[in-house]
Image (cartoon, rainbow, N blue to C red):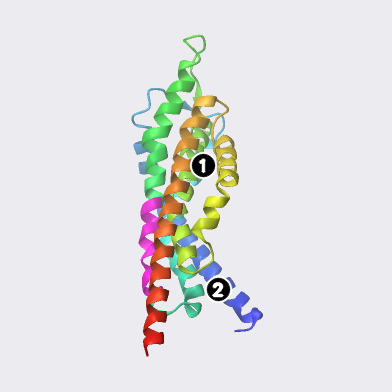
Amino acid sequence: MHIVQHLEELRKRIIITFLVFLLFLVMVFVYVQDIYHVLVKDLPFKLALLGPSDILIVYFMIASVVAIAATIPVGAHQAWLFVRPALTPKERKVTITYIPALFILFVLGISFGYYILLPLVLNFLMSLSNDMFNTFFTTEKYFQFLLHMTLPFGFLFELPVVMLFLTSLGIINPYRLQKIRKYAYFILIVVSILITPPDFLSDILVSIPLLLLYEGSVSLSKFVYKRQHRAKEGNKDVYESI
């Protein structure tokens, strides 16, 4: 393909993914009230509205997150279709297995933020008031806080699969990733500070999982890299024997 054809193909894949996202967004809006009630039923405080449009903004946030999660397999498949012509038959079989893993890891990341980090950080921040203030949460502010504690982890938990995919394509080298570890740590810590409330405990609770994710991703990348290297050496030996 020429560069224009590549761009047209990429445009096609992006449009398909975006249309699927819009479709899921409309479908989720039908059940968004039920999802909202599930999310707020166990809260120890009441949420308030400051304006008539606040609840619509909250509904849109909830529907967007669910639609993104549902769109991930489709988007991953479209990305795979885009790069498929450049892959060998063996690479195609291997890389297509990453598609369900992307969805599973996204859900795991959201669940980690919602069930583990959110209660810890929220309880800590509420304890700082020490009964000196009346607790008053608006619906919009609470769900913005909820998104900050969950959605970034949905994407960050994709890191192992992305590294495996790029390693299998020969784009990244795990040993180079080890050499830039300190720079990667710095970036991840900055990200954790940006996505969490401005307190030290939240930064620590978020930074540690991100650093462990990075190390786990490098280890998985190294495993794939070594296996590919052994396969190439085996093919080379067979060729020389012939």
Q: Which mark is residue 131?
A: none
Q: Which residues are magenta?
A: 91-105
Q: In the visual, does 52 lie left or right of 100?
A: right
| Residue at 49 percent of width and 59 percent of height | 22
* 8 w.r.t. 121: above or below: below
Q: Position of residue 111 (x, y in %)?
A: 37, 42
**Rendered view: 1 above or below 199:** below
Q: Position of residue 112 (x, y in %)?
A: 38, 40
Q: Is residue 189 left or right of residue 153?
A: right
Confirm whether the magenta stretch covers residue 197: no
Would you place residue 19 above or below residue 176 in this image? below
Give residue 161's quadrant in the image.
Answer: bottom left
Query: What SS does tag 2 mark?
Result: helix
Going by the picture, which residue comes out furthest to the right?
4
Work out whether residue 174 or residue 94 is closer to the camera in this orientation and state it. Answer: 174
- Label 2, label 1: how many angstroms apart (C-alpha)? 31 Å
At 49% from the left edge and 22% from the top edge, which residue is drawn? 125
Q: Which residue is mark 1?
A: 56
State which quarter of the image contains the C terminus: bottom left
Q: Is residue 205 visible?
A: yes
| Residue 97 x/y as whole percent | 36, 66
Q: Secondary structure at mark 1?
A: helix
Q: Residue furthest bottom?
A: 242
Residue designated by label 2? 12
The mark that comes first in sequence, 2 or 1, is: 2
Residue 98 sits in which quadrant? bottom left
Dot 1: few (<14), some (14–19), or many (≥20) neighbours within 10 Å? few
In the image, residue 101 lies in the stretch drawn in magenta:
yes
> What is the chief secondary structure element of the magenta stretch?
helix
Under mark 1, the amino acid is Leu
Q: Residue at x 37, y 70 (%)?
A: 94
